[in-house]
Amino acid sequence: MSEERKKNIGPFRYFVLNKPQNMVSQFKSNDTVNLLGTLSFEFPEGTHAIGRLDNDSEGLLLLTTDQRITRLLFNGPVSHQRKYMVQVKGEVTEQTIAILSTGIDILVEGPTYYKTLPCEVSRVEHPESLYAQFEPVKHYGPYTWLLISNAEGKFRQIRKMVRAAGHPCRRLIRVAIEDLTLGNLKPGEVAELTEADFYTKLKLELPS
């Protein structure tokens, strides 16, 4: 790596991955699963995922060697918007979209239910317009694509929301966190960002 490149990236490294399906957001596991380390990209020592996408979910996953990011992004005073493109079973009505938008009860643990906070939900007629690398998957029966933007991150929340509304999730792609998007990344591809770009697009204040 050139000295100029080292100067630009600073002491920490920042990456954006388009996580494919059937891959966990980890480098190590005791289970027999596809790990991040199997990707054809050489991550530096100390790289970790910021937040997670479950095994079946796809899309934007952030990775870094900067331990500060998780605290700033998920435990800071300001909530950060995440956008998901979600394919659900059945034809979703405007009434259901309104219910999802204003808050819906989901099961979070045992018999405990939680009402989600208001969020933005809209129908997507052409998913490829939001996700350039979209590859259609054939599904039998009617389905609907939704764009859901929320600032909460409870375990499998989006999947639980649409299921509670009577429309089980068939596919889930995270397409953005604040102004940081998938761009032209194909599934399994990684892009490296500078520290300034990473913090700016996530709307985080760069620590002094």
Image (cartoon, rainbow, N blue to C red):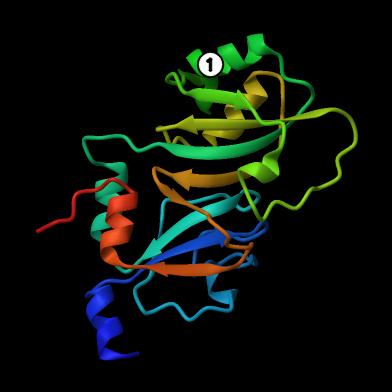
Residue at image coords 33%, 48%: 202
Quadrant housing residue 91: top right
Residue at image coords 52%, 78%: 41
Q: Residue furthest bottom?
A: 2
Would residue 196 be found to the left or right of residue 53 on screen? left
Residue at image coords 85%, 27%: 142
Q: Quadrant of the C terminus?
A: bottom left
Depth check, front residue: 97 or 25: 97
Q: Quadrant of the N terminus?
A: bottom left
Q: Residue furthest right?
A: 140
Going by the numbered disc 1, the residue's amino acid type is Ile
x then y, percent, for residue 47: 38, 70
Q: Residue furthest front?
A: 129
x then y, percent, for residue 32: 65, 67
Is the residue marked by circle 1 packed among few (<14), some (14-19), or many (20+) residues within 10 Å?
some
Q: Which residue is mark 1?
A: 104
x then y, percent, for residue 139: 86, 40
Q: Residue furthest left?
A: 208
Q: With respect to residue 179, does 146 lie above or below?
A: above
